[in-house]
Image (spheres, grey):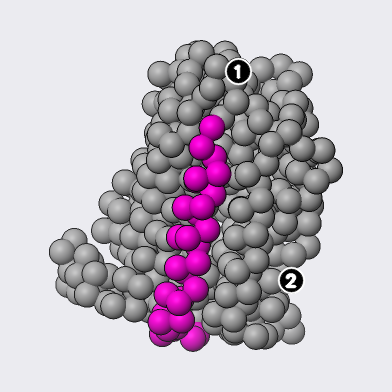
Amino acid sequence: MGDFESMSKEKLLLWTLAAINFTHIVDFMILMPLGPQLMRIFEITPKEFGLLVSSYTFSAGASSFLGAFFLDKYDRRTILMWVFLGFLMGTLACALSPNYFVLLIARIISGVFGGLTSALVLAIIGDAIPDNRRGRAMGLVMAAFSVASVVGVPFGLFIASLSSWHAPFFFLAILSVVILGLIYKYVPSITSHLVSKENKPSPMLVIRRVTGNANQMRAILLTVLMMLGQFTVIPFLSPFMVSNVGFSEIQLTYIYMAGGFFTVFTSPWVGRLTDKYGKIRVFTIFMSLNVIPIGIITNLGVTPIGFALLVSTIFFVTSNGRMVPAAALITGTAKPENRGSFLSFNSAVQQFSAGVASFMGGMILVESADGRLLNFEWIGYWAILISLLCIPLIRKIKVVDTDASLSGDLVKDKSS
């Protein structure tokens, strides 16, 4: 009965973390399919739109770096509630933005708290779920990306088409209020990572713990390469599909619905494969497959919608498939006492790299006189090269934490 109760609470925790991830991902992703609309309304260039996307990731990276110095000093549940409240405020600021400049500032605020949210979700999984179930846990929580794609983004685009681009952010703000209640109810107090005040590491020691650990630095380098290989492509996929391939703005929802629908099922499946066959093997397979749709999609001209959707769906499925084993492996490279610090560093690097990648993409892309985006194929070649470098690198990364501090003891929630 105790095991059943523990597993039930574990599932409620994971569903809550998935809901947090869903909101955070929709908040980040919704801007990209709104790109054609925002570029038209604000009369901005691809470079300025790239800055709008990268501002979120740069600020998330900065906050994640600073978070490395304090996330391990507090109860995970307490700090998560405060961080998510800040994220709610930032999202509301986006909803109320009247122009490009104010929206840019609001995206920076959202990014500050969004970056910390990502690190905390991974740290809680690492603390609460043992390594032999971590692949499935990551698969479930990362299925939030799929649900965000198949439900969140299309619904956001739908209400934006009925009202204005402000509407999706109002929807996310309301949803965040509900999720704040779920955090209070289902995320347990997690304090096993805390050390006494006398033993609390200084900021310099926190930095040395990460930078002096070759295994963790390889994990961080893997994160950098994965982001550089993806976020030169992803932010400009929607504008490219409209200007070059022949999609209408409303048809962009099909890309996210189709990709998201399939990854809802493939993400947990990849999680099970990861636990059964190993993180490195599953990562290698999906990363190898991922470069195929990258090569095709960045070279498309005017194309039948059906074929373009097939390629974009394979792109989403394989992109998600490589993230699940990579996240499970990276999380296991740190011990509980410095997991939050390490994952904050990793989240900072992830966000900075995504920001650099999207800014680079905006610099490479050129808008022609007839409105088409040029040079997208060069972005694709870059993404393929960087992605393939990840395969030999991941083979050198080792898991050092195979158990979870809360395994068998997840019932320690606020009510006990």
Q: Residues within 10 Å of mark 1 (few under 14, many from 20)?
A: few
Residue bearing the label numbered 2: 269
Please tell me which residue lies in front, 178 or 149.
149
Q: Is residue 213 left or right of residue 42?
A: left
Looking at the rendered structure, the secondary structure element under dot 2 is: helix
Looking at the rendered structure, which numbered label has been put on residue 102? none
Q: Residues within 10 Å of mark 2 (few under 14, many from 20)?
A: some
Q: Residue at x 66, y 31 (%)?
A: 244
Please tell me which residue lies in front, 221 or 99.
221
Please tell me which residue lies in front, 415 or 226.
226
**Residue 94 coordinates in the image, percent (x, y):** 51, 26
Q: Is residue 160 above or below residue 273?
A: above
Q: Is residue 244 left or right of residue 332?
A: right
Q: Residue at x 42, y 75 (%)?
A: 393
Residue bearing the label numbered 1: 370
Indicate which disc, 2 or 1, sits on the residue closer to the N terminus. 2
Tag 1: residue type? Asp
Q: Is residue 256 left or right of residue 102?
A: right
Tell me, yes or no, whether the highlighted magenta stretch contains residue 384: yes
**Residue 33 coordinates in the image, percent (x, y):** 63, 33
Quick check: can you spot residue 208? yes
**Residue 309 coordinates in the image, percent (x, y):** 77, 45
**Magenta span main SS:** helix
Q: Residue at x 50, y 85 (%)?
A: 403
Looking at the rendered structure, the secondary structure element under dot 1 is: loop
Residue range in magenta is 374-403
